[in-house]
Amino acid sequence: MTDRGAAERTAGGREERTRAVPTVPLPRLGPVTLVGHGIRLEPLAEAHVPGLQDVVADGEIHRLPFAPHVPAPEAVEGSVARLTADVEAGTRLAWAVVREADEQVVGLTTFMNLALADRGLEIGNTYLAGSVHRTGVNSAMKHLLLTHAFDELEMLRVEFRVHHLNVASRRAVEALGAQQDGILRAHRILPDGSVRHTVVYSILAHEWPGIRAMLEGRIGRTPHSARG
């Protein structure tokens, strides 16, 4: 007899079985523009380089701790070229974050570590201009990305990975409703020679409706001027 689910042991010691996942066609990934809540996520292109140079200089976010993925202004062009090459190779989707009120580029984000056969991906390589931190842009961006991942691409799992010492980012991911899956110990050696333990979080498809409602409530409470 075919097993319809995998056994799991709960925190209380009870054994449960996960339901089998319906077979669906693999999602077809391609560049797409996502719009809502006063921002627009545009497929990353060379034309975004000048705007992204301003982004990384805004608050000198490339100098912040735990941000080796954020290029210095002079390295933005090369970084964008590498990311767009990944997109062309089918291993990533990448977007520039544009504020619609003034058409200003305010950040960058990607879908990475694509595991389409398992219907999973990671949201990562994200950075936002210092001046838009705590303005609602991040919540708006996450809402657009998660909606695309779960509602349009029918992902089963969306993952986030954070440096173990990056308390602010860990709190932000936890506030999103993501659950901590575990810690990859001594996972990476960073450019400065330090060793990073990586905290892994995830949101599953059945958790998304509740998180979506929470995000929409949060965005709705943000003043319009901040969202724009």
Image (cartoon, rainbow, N blue to C red):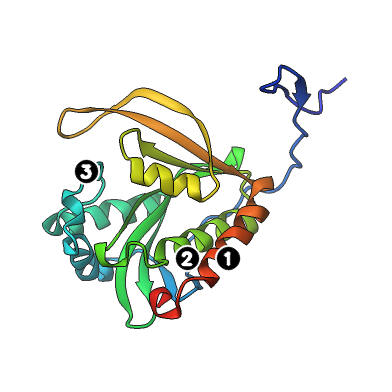
156 vs 221, nearest the viewer: 221
Asked if one can make out residue 18 in the rendered structure from this viewpoint, the answer is yes
**Residue at the disc numbered 1:** 216
**Residue at the disc numbered 2:** 140
The amino acid marked with disc number 3 is Pro
Please state if 23 lies on the left or on the right of 56 as rendered.
right
Please state if 81 lies on the left or on the right of 221 as rendered.
left
SS for dot 2:
helix
The mark nearer the N terminus, 2 or 1, is 2
26 vs 208, nearest the viewer: 208
The amino acid marked with disc number 1 is Glu
Residue furthest left as drawn: 74
Please state if 99 lies on the left or on the right of 36 as rendered.
left
SS for dot 3:
loop
For the residues labelled 3 and 1, say whether their Cβ atoms are less than 8 Å apart. no
* Residue 137 percent location from the top left of the image: 40, 66
154 vs 165, nearest the viewer: 165
The mark nearer the N terminus, 3 or 1, is 3
Asked if one can make out residue 123 in the rendered structure from this viewpoint, the answer is no
Q: Which mark is residue 65?
A: 3
Measure the C-alpha gap from mark 3 to mark 1.
30 Å
